[in-house]
Amino acid sequence: MDLYLETARLVLRRFTAGDVEVLVELDSDLEVMRYLTGQPTPRDEIEQKVLPGILATYETHPGRGTFAAHEKSSGAFIGWFGLQPTGEQRVAGVGYRLKRSAWGKGYATEGTRALIDKAFTDLDIERVVADTMAVNTKSRRVMVKSGLRFVRVFHLHFDDPLPGTEHGEVEYAVDRATWESTVRSGPRDLEGGLLR
């Protein structure tokens, strides 16, 4: 296993060419895909585009990319977390996609916060950003609990919009200075809250 990052309950590793099945299973759940495409990702797209793109990012942008997430306790694959390159050299995009069995356990916050921490401690990143549909309230809550702050609502054009698209997309972000002040204010629990 090519380990990328560990948290209290998660192990993140690089994907390999042999990970087609776990990605197909993840992307075949319509609830998982609800705010993304609204439909399963076809196997041939995962084989020919998605997974090769993930693997290529490891080479072109060291330290960034999409990483398979496993529960430490069971070893089970639960989805992925990403720390993605953006159009700006010192800005990274953070995101995740988790199986329904992993929802509601604080994993999204735990993994997202760990990637934000890594971006600022190990990777010369100055700003971390994330976006989702405005109606995706659960992901918006994860963003806030992970230390990201609301920036703006924006609208994109889609030829085949998902329900809720009319409300726009939202952007959240945190910069290095804000992150440093948060880290100095005390240790955090698994949900991202400060321990008192």
Image (cartoon, rainbow, N blue to C red):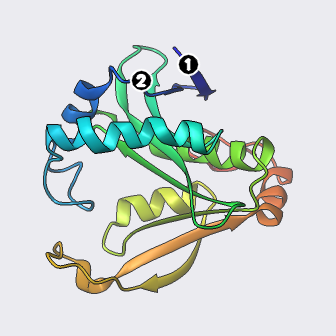
Residue 5 picture location, percent across and down: 62, 29
In the image, is residue 35 above or below residue 116? below
| Residue ID at (51%, 14%) | 1
| Residue carrying label 1 | 2
Horizontally, residue 161 falls left or right of residue 12, namely: left
Residue 56 picture location, percent across and down: 48, 39
| Residue ID at (58%, 21%) | 3
- In the depicted view, which residue is nearer to us: 108 or 27? 27
Q: Quadrant of residue 100?
A: top left
- In the depicted view, which residue is nearer to us: 35 or 195? 35
Q: Which mark is residue 16?
A: 2
How far is the residue under mark 1 from the one under mark 2? 9 Å
Q: Quadrant of residue 7?
A: top right
In the image, is residue 31 above or below residue 101? below
Counting labels gives 2
* Amino acid at dot 1: Asp
